[in-house]
Amino acid sequence: MTRTPDSLPQDPMIRSLVRSQLAGRRVSRRRLMMGAGAAGLLGALSACGTGGTPGAEEGPAEDLSDESMALFWANWSLYLDYDSGAGTYPTLERFQEETGISVTYAEDIDGNESYYGTVQNQLRQGQGFGQDIVTFTDWMAARLIAAGQVRELNHENIPHLDNLLPGLRDVGFDPDRRHSVTWQSGMTGLAWNKESVPDGVHSVTQLFTDPDLRGRVVVLDEWRDTLALIMLDQGADVTSFDSDDFESALELLEESISNGQIRQVRGNAYMEDLVSGDALAVMAWSGDITQLNLEEGDRWEFALPEAGGALWSDNLLIPHGAEHQTNAERLMDFYLQPDVAAEVAAYVNYVCPVQGAQEAMEEIDPDLAEDPMIFPTEEMQADLHTIRSMDAEEEAEFTDRFQAVIGN
């Protein structure tokens, strides 16, 4: 299950040309996310790699940071501030100048499962695969941490770790952030056409019962988002939900599809439905609505439901076989500085996870400093919840059940 039609070309020259076409407009990070369908999840557990015997583990690779001022970082496309004129990443250039560490930055990740499938054998055996930092979404980060495939961080090298927003400092899949650092975050909530629905949509119950919205509702095909909002509306705690909570939410989804209230279950194509008018109200990812309003006029409103919304993040992790752990930790610390985080946020337009970045943003773009899609208010932060992590078997089971209901 993928959220975007095609990833950027892998050839660096062609990718550069594509990026130049995209320069100047904000591109949704969430468009590039890839969900974990059951087939993808189970396939990733057996996909071919270049490592040795599955299950064999080696000791941590020697940290060569003192003798090798190098660093290799795999990230998603269009997910770091980029100067199209100079062909450089300004904050990354600054890091290299300040530290003397040469960074090889690769936009290699176009999906959690697809990238994991290419490196899983090396991860399972503790072998290096050419990257010191990888960037994975919460649920995939949880998988790697639970499997012991990433290194424990030396927090002495990350003195700015306390700059993370309070809600991100201690997460269920990584207590006390012993293995990961948040890169960027996003929100899942409700969005609607402001002209057609002037009073707004304030709850999942309203979304699923309002007769004026019948047949004009679209929900997301990523179950962690859609069912999280339903479970919250039903009073469940998504940080500790059980199978009964899941089934109750799934039953309501199935009923709302069957009775015609929900028009479709979609990935990022829900934005096309908003533009065409086929959908008046949707479950949505915050960055998408920010981008849509920039591209199509300020026609839509995004808000968290009264029962709360979902918070998801992408995280920086150091694979077990990385050879430059200290250098990687220095880069993590660099991006936790408010002025640096603000510069990145001004480009990517997702939720900035760093305290103090909002004040720093006032020097860069005062309008963005007031944008709650980048800097959620304290009230919004209190209403954001991160869905709990799951083991592979439970994740596959829930995914299968969801796919059966939505007909995929």
Image (cartoon, grey):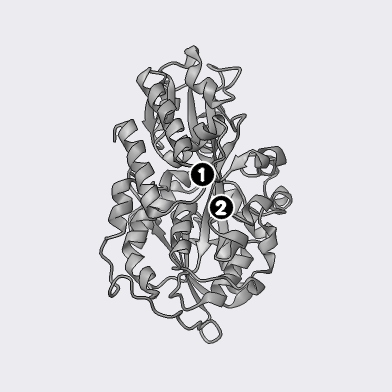
**Residue 174: x, y in percent?**
55, 59
Residue 26: numbered disc: 1
Q: What quarter of the picture does the C terminus occupy?
A: top left
Residue 299 location, quadrant: top right
Instruction: Choose between 226 and 292: the one closer to the eye.
Output: 226
Residue 238 location, quadrant: top right
Residue 330: numbered disc: none
Labels 2 & 1 near each other (Cβ < 8 A)? no
Q: What quarter of the picture does the N terminus occupy?
A: top left
Total labels: the figure holds 2
Residue plotted at (38% across, 54% down): 392
**Residue 290: x, y in percent?**
55, 37
Task: Sort mark 1 into few (<14), some (14-19) or many (20+) by Cα contacts within 10 Å.
Answer: some
Task: Sort mark 2 into few (<14), some (14-19) or many (20+) by Cα contacts within 10 Å.
Answer: many
**Residue 71: x, y in percent?**
49, 74
In the picture provided, is 225 more to the left or to the right than 356? left
Kind of residue sitting beneath label 1: Arg
- Label 2 vs label 1, nearer the camera: 2
In the rendered view, tell whether residue 107 sits above or below residue 7.
Answer: below
Q: Residue furthest bottom?
A: 67
The answer to whether residue 17 is seen in the rendering is: no
**Residue 164: x, y in percent?**
66, 56
Residue 184: numbered disc: 2
Name the N-terminal-most of marks 2 and 1.
1
Helix, strand or loop at mark 2: strand
Kind of residue sitting beneath label 2: Gln
How far is mark 2 from mark 1, CA to CA?
15 Å
The answer to whether residue 208 is seen in the rendering is: yes
